[in-house]
Amino acid sequence: MKTNKLIATIILSLAFLSGYAQKDKIRQATKEYENFAYLKTTEILLEVANKGYTSVDILQKLGNSFYFTNKMEDAAKWYAALMAMNETVDAEYYFRYAQALKSVENYTESDKWMKKFLELKKDDLRGRAFLSKVDYLSKIEAASRDIEIKNLDINSNQSDFGTAQFNTKIIFASSRGGGKKYKWNEQPFLDLFSAEKQEDGTYSNVKEFGGDINTKYHESTVSFTPKEDVMYFTRNNYFKGKFKKDDNNTNRLKIYKATKESDNTWGPIESIHFNSDDYSVAHPSVNINGTKLYFASDMPGTYGNSDIFVADIKPDGSLGEPINLGSSINTEAQETFPFINEVGDLYFSSNGFAGLGGLDIFVIRDFEKKFENKLPLVIENLAKPINGPKDDFGYYENLTTKEGFFTSNRDGGKGDDDIYTFNLPQCTQTLKGVVKDEYTKALLPGATVNLLTENGKPISQVTVGNDAAFSFEVACNQEFLVRASKDTYMPDEVRVTTPNKKQELQLELSLKPDELKIQEGTDLAKTLNIPIIYFDFDKHNIRYDAEVELQKVLAVMNKYPTMTIDIRSHTDCRAKAAYNLMLSENRAKSTRQYLIKKGIAPNRLTAKGYGESQLVNDCGCEPTNESNCTEAKHQLNRRSEFIIVKM
């Protein structure tokens, strides 16, 4: 028999990782390296920024450098400076800033930046609940698992459904009890029964449960508080001998509460305060902390035939006001039979989402944390073999005993609705990969690879061997960070969401050199990624944006006090040659003069302008070539160089 007929089911439609690897000791003495040295760009950027010279690029790299080394107070500082610039940045920086703020307990500000992240990343799994309605059958098929389900021996030839564990028993509803018959199907009204777990893991010895809990009308779907001293269960609107109906002559469902007595009997029985004669409240599920009661109802304000709600369980045992879980879960159809497991995953049945037919069972992983923090909810179909073309509902699992239960009226059962059981699959994924140099593609033996949670908490760490390979065994249906680092390189990180099917995932982490070889002839502009030193039109005084870049050169020269450099200024050829030569000469001299004013000895600096005489592309000065030249090509010729003459 269809369960929605049986119980009038009330349903709820519910990087550039600038976190550079730390060296034991920064190489200080140039004499140890004869005619070359190594430059650690992070320290240079920090020195520049601490002097008040900042740019989007500098702040991003500094924020990242602390974020990826879990120095969140410093990360928050530099990300805050980045956000204060009001420049367009990748949404990932909003997310990282929000996480950094949360780690220093600035929750209000963190929420603000998470909202900004959500606005820009509507398609991100962290940003919104997502259920694709395109190709859903193939997606469900891909999510199907190779698990064996068994029809419980205790099932009868009538209706058995809705499972919960209590001590060494399972508690379920069944119409096997005899007595008054339900006119809808001419079967006895439902009562609660128990079955004892045997040493071989099977269940037998079925008995009526709860003494005075069962009445001549329906009882079903029970849930216990963590101490198993309070139970919530579903019953018809029948209390203290009174059977009540609404204005449409319908007897509704209600949730009742019973407390265990000192002699282990159940009583007294109470009706929870938001029950009503005019709507149904049913299918309770208490969370692991005993602080939340989830249930289904068609009370006013529902989105469809029934919705899933939650109410707080207060310390004194009283219940707060019901809260609808919202339109991301509840649809215009039926959502019902909620179950919240030990880690806060919410399971429920629905016919409002794309499925295989009838009621399908869905899950929202990590629901409690996400709902509390107003994070996006992702609804997953449990797929085959748990879901099928008939009604599948009443999911329950115990992560400690690794047992799972659900109810179905699928073909091949013993009665109208049967309880099925299965062992929770030990689903793991293998994350494998290698660490390489991004530019040369050479393997990087000795690199450290860290596996972290989605929020950056360490899980495991390995140091790769000569093959630069790493491997981690991880759980299914979870998000992880995989981060690689090595001395003299900048770390790399990838975010991975594992599927719910066992397989091997291949990664490649590419590290950019953090220490760059410098020697006589090196151009610091290229080494430090210094763009054009811009001057205002027809002027040669140093602008602020140029000053930020020159701070990098200043920091290097202070680090290596015997270094001398030659400043070279170039132009394109879109003015007269004599004019360009004079302009470049003045700009080179202005740059030299700026560095002298900042404390660099004059004898360590030479400067010369080359005008348009040393172009780097085919944008020459002949008019016939002008048509081939874009502004970007001209810009390549308008450059500054800082050539190391002597170390």
Image (tube, rainbow, N blue to C red):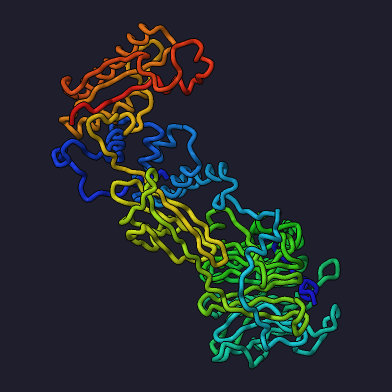
Q: Is residue 481 visible?
A: yes
Which sits in the foreground, 53 or 25?
25
Q: Which residue is found at the position 29% from the left and 31% from the top?
A: 552
Q: Is residue 369 above or below residue 622?
A: below
Which sits in the foreground, 136 or 82?
136
Task: Say which quarter of the image contains residue 235.
Answer: bottom right
Q: Is residue 555 above or below residue 593?
A: below
Q: Position of residue 487 (x, y in %)?
A: 28, 50
Residue 52 left/right relative to 11: left
Residue farthest along the left direction in this orientation: 31
Q: Is residue 454 visible?
A: no
Task: Say which quarter of the image contains residue 238.
Answer: bottom right
Q: Position of residue 492 (x, y in %)?
A: 40, 49
Quarter of the picture containing the N terminus is: bottom right
Q: Position of residue 555 (x, y in %)?
A: 24, 32
Quarter of the picture containing the C terminus is: top left
Residue 399 left/right relative to 533: right
Q: Which residue is found at the position 32% from the left and 46% from the top?
A: 489
Q: Position of residue 2 (x, y in %)?
A: 79, 74
Q: Is residue 644 above or below residue 334?
A: above
- Count of numbered labels shown in the rendering: 0
Residue 294 left/right relative to 158: left
Which sits in the foreground, 232 or 99?
99
Q: Which residue is found at the position 57% from the left and 66% from the top?
A: 501
Residue farthest along the bottom direction in this orientation: 205
